[in-house]
Image (cartoon, rainbow, N blue to C red):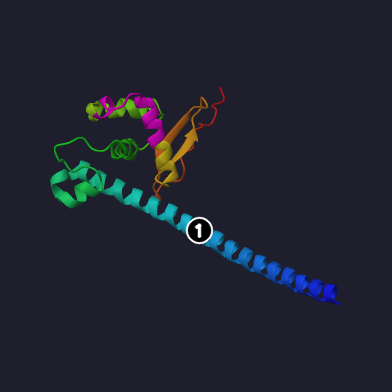
Amino acid sequence: MEVGKNNGGLHAHAISVQADSISAQHVVKAAHEELLQLMRQRAEIMKRIGTVKQTIAGLANLFGEQVLGDDLLELIDRKPNGRQPGFTKACRRVLMEVRRPLGAREVCLELERYAPAILARHKDPLASVTTVLNRLVDYGEARSLNNERGRRVWEWISDTEPPADVMPARKTA
């Protein structure tokens, strides 16, 4: 009879463990769904931030940076502060201002044009730019595409533009 009691106890324990497992699965599923929802919201917010930054940068280009306060210039990565902007900020600025998909080499050329000292600090600027561009994709600020030659390019995300179709339609002669 002692064995029967043990089996009953083991059975009850197994049911309890199974119930805990099902409960844990529900919690994990709910957390997973919430995480996905938050990531979608973050992507939408990053698009909106990108759009607003692009708008402000465009207004500064049109009317001059003097119409913006120092705090706003800093928010769009344009505040002159006597030092070179951070590497990531500089890459953001290039993507935001060029407004078309760029390859990593093109981003390097733009950086060389407007902030040459920034590249001098990097042993392999092309690798550094590629790393930053991929991080901007991870942050939801940029998207990665393939151009007509199958090479990887990146573009700034804004919610006022549809995703760029980098592959042009073939012309029939």
Residue 79 at what x, y percent from top left?
18, 43
Q: Is residue 142 above or below residue 38?
A: above
Residue 126 among magenta residues: yes
| Residue ID at (20%, 35%) | 84
| Residue ID at (25%, 46%) | 76
- Per the image, the residue denoted by label 1 is 35
Tag 1: Cα neighbours inside 10 Å, few (<14), some, or many (≥20)? few
Magenta segment, prevailing SS (helix, strand or loop)? helix
Q: Is residue 24 above or below residue 172?
A: below
Q: Nearer the viewer, residue 77 or 82?
A: 82
Residue 135 at what x, y percent from top left?
41, 40
Describe residue 166's horizontal placement relative to residue 104 as left or right. right
Q: Is residue 159 above or below residue 146?
A: below
Quadrant for the N terminus, please: bottom right
Outermost residue toward the top in this view: 173
Residue 121 at what x, y percent from top left?
27, 27
Residue 32 at what x, y percent from top left?
55, 59
Q: Nearer the viewer, residue 155 or 31?
A: 31
Describe residue 167's horizontal placement relative to residue 26 as left or right. left
Q: Nearer the viewer, residue 62 or 14?
A: 14
Outermost residue toward the right in this view: 1
Describe residue 87's horizontal placement relative to residue 66 as left or right. right
Badge 1 marks a residue whose secondary structure is helix
Quadrant for the C terminus, please: top right
Q: Is residue 123 above or below residue 30?
A: above
The residues colored magenta run: 118-132
